[in-house]
Image: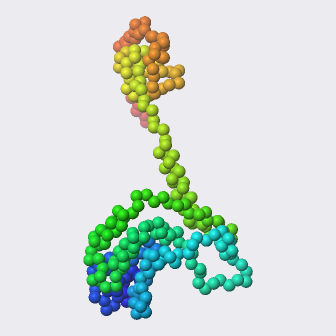
Amino acid sequence: RHQGTPGYAPQEQYPGGTGTDVRSDVYALGATLYFALTSHEPPSVSTRNQSIQQGQPDLPSLQEQLANNPPPESAEANAARQFRLGVTKPSKPAPRHIRHLAQLSKLPPELLDQLNRIIKRAMAMKQKDRYPSIAEFGNDLRKVVAALPAQIAPTPPPARPSDPNSTQPDLPLLYEAVQAAKANADQSSSTAVPDQPTQPMTCPRCGTALVQQATFCPGCGSALNSLFKGNTTEPGNIHKASSLSKLPVHDFSLDQTMVIKSEVQTQTQVQTFTKPKPEF
């Protein structure tokens, strides 16, 4: 028995192998990249050995997978594939178009061929033919990324008609709707108007600059709550001294002086009564 998933496990990981090392991880990474690009599971070691014995390519190339990708289905073909009574279900479903795989056709032919050679070297059957380290494998992939066109305008996929006879949710359509909503939200947030800068607040009586949440004016000592009482604008907002300078001025010299008298302490007499003893 071997440990690993068929298609991602190299030959040395099977019973009787020479033992695993870093190049075994390179094989698994190459198989993962193969699946990420083609949406097809890589063939297992036994399948590849059979192809080699028959004189056939043991690993389908990216160009071959791209050529075998069926064209997109039209609305008529999708409508014709419906459940009908009395019609037996085919044993093997017909291959469908893979949009993820079709994106490889946007790459230049020489760049696609270079990417195919990288995968074949990473997934070589013999350990000595693979990349000796993951770093060297990554360096070749970085060269492919650097050689990509500066900007490839993505072509919008054709509208997929909904199947009225389907009982399952259309997950691709739901995913596209969520992505479109996120794009609209990002665009609306980027065009938001920035907040206007606030002006300093001044005392309506003497014009002294005030601090936010101040209770008394530091210049004239007036209580700000009484000055702003009856005004719709609170002290924490912006005020203009020119518009509030017409408020009536209060003269503190006319206020009556409050005299505090000393308290007269009164003594209370406490009478103590003794309880008479009972007579027998």
Q: Quadrant of the C terminus?
A: top left
State whether residue 151 appears in this view.
Answer: yes
Residue 248 drawn above or below residue 223: above
Residue at point 30%, 79% (across, down): 130
Residue 229 vs residue 156, the one in the foreground: 156
Residue 260 vs residue 237, the one in the foreground: 237
Residue 163 vs residue 103, the one in the foreground: 103
Left-right relation of 252 to 86 = left
Residue 94 in the image: state x and y as whole percent: 59, 80
Residue 140 in the image: state x and y as whole percent: 32, 70
Residue at point 49%, 41% (across, down): 192
Q: Quadrant of residue 167?
A: bottom right
Residue 135 in the image: state x and y as whole percent: 28, 70
State whether residue 264 appears in this view.
Answer: no
Residue 235 in the image: state x and y as whole percent: 45, 25
Residue at point 48%, 13% (across, down): 247
Q: Quadrant of the N terminus?
A: bottom left
- Residue lying at the far top in this picture: please name it: 254
Left-right relation of 131 to 8 = left
- Residue lying at the far right in this picture: please name it: 85
